[in-house]
Image (cartoon, rainbow, N blue to C red):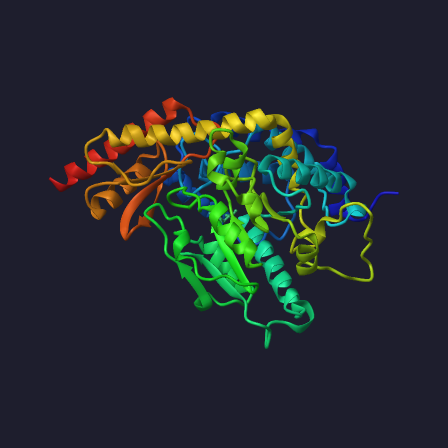
Amino acid sequence: MKSANLIQTKMYADVHDKSLFEAAQHLGQDYLENIFERNVFPSENALDDLKHFDETLPTASSDANKVIQFLNTYGAPATVATLGARYFGFVSGSAVPAGLAAKSLATFWDQAPAMHVLSPIGSKLETVVESWLKDLFHLPEKTVAGFVSGTSSANFCGLAAARYRLLSNLNWDVNSKGLFNAPKIRIVTGKHAHSTVLKAISLLGFGIENIEWVDVDDQGRIIPERMPELDNSTIVILQAGNVNSGSFDNFNVICKKANTANAWVHIDGAFGLWAAAVEKLNHLTQGIELANSWAVDGHKTLNTPYDSGIVMCSDKEAIRSALHMAGSYIITSEQRDGMFYTPEMSRRARVIELWATMKYLGKSGIDEMIYEMHQRAQQVAKELAAIDGFTILNDVVFNQVLVQCNTDTLTEKTMENVQQLRECWAGGSLWNGRKVIRVSICSWATTSKDISRSVKSFEKALLMVKKECS
Ligand SMILES: *Cc1c(COP(=O)(O)O)cnc(C)c1O
């Protein structure tokens, strides 16, 4: 019998339309192959063409092939080439090809690993990757992991576990009683804590104004001697990788103090925790195993596709209690039910591309890839420092480089010109009250040629400002 439902008939036809999926695949691969040469930021024309998306929701359904072609025509040119080799903005990260391919395959599986019964493969890979990460970062055996969208969410989860545990130790069940009239929880963190840490603090009801700020040194590291007295109602938040300078807090000294006082330590290691996986850099992360929870991104230094964040916690009961879930229709199992480790119930099985990236690289590939980023960062610093008019402000211990010109105006205008030239892209920040250009090396694809080419663009950008001014 022929279905009277036209849209259903059409979609059954789409499933069998090889050209539809092949087009998406081919256009995607062409995009990837060309990314290393194209302008890193969209051209003015491409940005202008975004106006084609300004339409009301179509009344009639359209042809699936036409939807894909339209998206590619006006969408692809308006992307930022964060996947490429010369994107140094924020702390972003490219994607390892094997991870992209795994994501592409898994797109068709469309798995939601909330429960084992919803996705045995998702549940299995989450278990496997949890143990790989524990091993790679040398974290306590009892550590568990939750697979979330990024470090913003991972910071939130780690601090929620901390809140649960400390209040529980003080005979207060925050899940049932809430925060009103609860014993006071103290928050101690460095003056350079990342803004997403502050967001988590406010979401969790601690209040930004209640933070006990600790002074930092010239690299943005907490000065251990300035730490206040700690006790069993204190959450200490440390940093592996300062978002500007890339510096690391002194985990050994601070964690030992915190452990003695029964305080909780959370480490925001969005991009820097990966230093633990690099033989020549793991002196930076010494002592991280003494903390209680950790947040890290797959999509930054490890170069998985977006969105891939991980929360790890050595107190399984605390994180599961903080992110608890119940419902008459929930089917739990002996195996891993992922939703007990994340704020969401439904989410995509982002662990698949994380697993593929790690399996592909192996320990030595991860080490080599990340150490290369460090060396390229040192190269940027060295080549820019050799040019009159540029100064490097930080010790390049990892992958971040802070660049300054002679005045704030020169710095800002040079940065704008670098962005206009589109040979590479770097953004700005503030460092000790002065404007800086922040260069973050976090793509597997960046070669020493890419660095030299980018440095030339910086030099040209500075010359352009000087010409305008004279
Ligand atoms: C990027 C970053 C975050 C936020 O991570 P998202 O994955 O963007 O949510 C937090 N802390 C630091 C130090 C970061 O670099």
Instruction: Decide which of 320, 107 is in the foreground and name it.
Output: 320
**In this view, 317 is above or below 353:** below
Residue found at x 32% / y 40%: 394
Quick check: can you spot residue 152?
Answer: no
| Residue at the outermost top position | 449
Give the answer, above or below, for where 36 lies relative to 389: above
Q: Quadrant of the C terminus?
A: top left
Q: Please state the horizontal and vertical placement of residue 230, each as a whole percent of the image.
A: 50, 61
Report whether 60 appears left or right of 277: right
Task: Pick whichever, 442 or 228, lies toward us.
Answer: 228
Q: Position of residue 120 (x, y in %)?
A: 78, 41
Residue at point 85% right, 43% down? 2
* Residue drawn at 45 percent across, 27 percent down: 372
Write the residue at 22% across / 48% down. Answer: 408
Residue 383 in view, yes or no = yes
- Identify the image quadrant of the N terminus: top right
Observer-nearest of 160 and 81: 160
* Residue extending furthest toward the right: 1
Q: Position of residue 62 (x, y in %)?
A: 64, 44
Q: Nearer the viewer, residue 107 or 152?
A: 152
Most extreme residue toward the front is 260
Residue 178: percent from the left, percent from the top? 63, 72
Most distant residue in the bottom direction: 181
Q: Quadrant of residue 247?
A: top left
Q: Is residue 15 left or right of residue 74?
A: right
Numbered marks: total: 0
